């Protein structure tokens, strides 16, 4: 997506805290005219699954238009399951070896 070492400014970022512990990060960044969702979770975050999922859904539903996410399934085997729960669908596009998923928000 971007050359190694490139720093991008998030358009928006959210950190989910549960019992004072940061368990997930979600944000938006713009690249080549598209808005990409960036999601990251901590190891052991499964214990906070529902709270985390609901917070991510709120962030995504607050947006309008089309959103994209890169899914690195080889690194994060559970990522497709999470993206499906969030309403994303896979596309045929590959970006830096990662499958691009999309969701349309009206």
Image (tube, grey):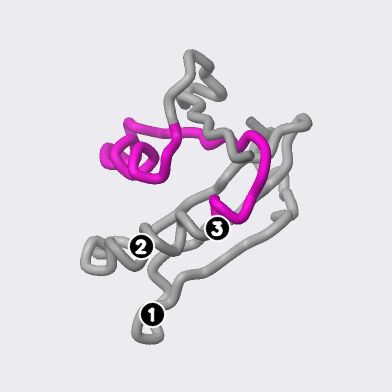
Separation (CA) of disc 1 from disc 3: 19 Å
User: Pointer 2 and pointer 3: residues touching (CB < 8 Å)?
Assistant: no
Residue 90 screen position, x and y as percent: 43, 24
What residue is shown with label 2?
A: 42
In the rendered image, the quadrant that contains the N terminus is: top right
Give the residue furthest to the front. 106
Residue 100 screen position, x and y as percent: 51, 26
Asked which quadrant contains residue 22, the reply is bottom left
Q: Give me the residue at 63% from left, 39% from top.
A: 106
Give the residue furthest to the bottom. 20
Residue 28 screen position, x and y as percent: 64, 50
User: Pointer 1 and pointer 2: residues touching (CB < 8 Å)?
Assistant: yes
Indicate yes or no whether the magenta region holds residue 83. Answer: yes
Indicate the secondary structure of the residue bearing disc 3: helix
> Which sits earlier in the primary sequence, circle 2 or circle 3?
2
Using a 10 Å C-alpha cutoff, classify the residue at mark 3 as few (fewer than 14 neighbours), some (14 to 19) or many (20 or more). Answer: some
Q: Left of 76 or right of it: where is 100? A: right
Residue in front for this viewpoint, 89 or 77: 89
> Which sits earlier in the primary sequence, circle 1 or circle 3?
1
What residue is shown with label 1?
A: 21
């Amino acid at each position: 997506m971007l050359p190694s070492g490139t720093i991008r400014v998030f358009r928006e970022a959210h950190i989910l805290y549960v019992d004072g512990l940061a368990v997930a990060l979600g944000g938006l960044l713009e690249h080549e005219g598209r808005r990409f969702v960036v999601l990251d979770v901590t190891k052991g975050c499964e214990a906070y699954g529902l709270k985390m999922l609901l917070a991510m859904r709120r962030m995504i539903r607050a947006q309008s238009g089309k959103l994209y996410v890169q899914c690195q399934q080889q690194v994060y085997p559970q990522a497709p399951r999470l993206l499906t729960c969030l309403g994303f669908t896979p596309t045929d596009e590959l970006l830096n070896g990662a499958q691009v998923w999309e969701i349309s928000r009206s």
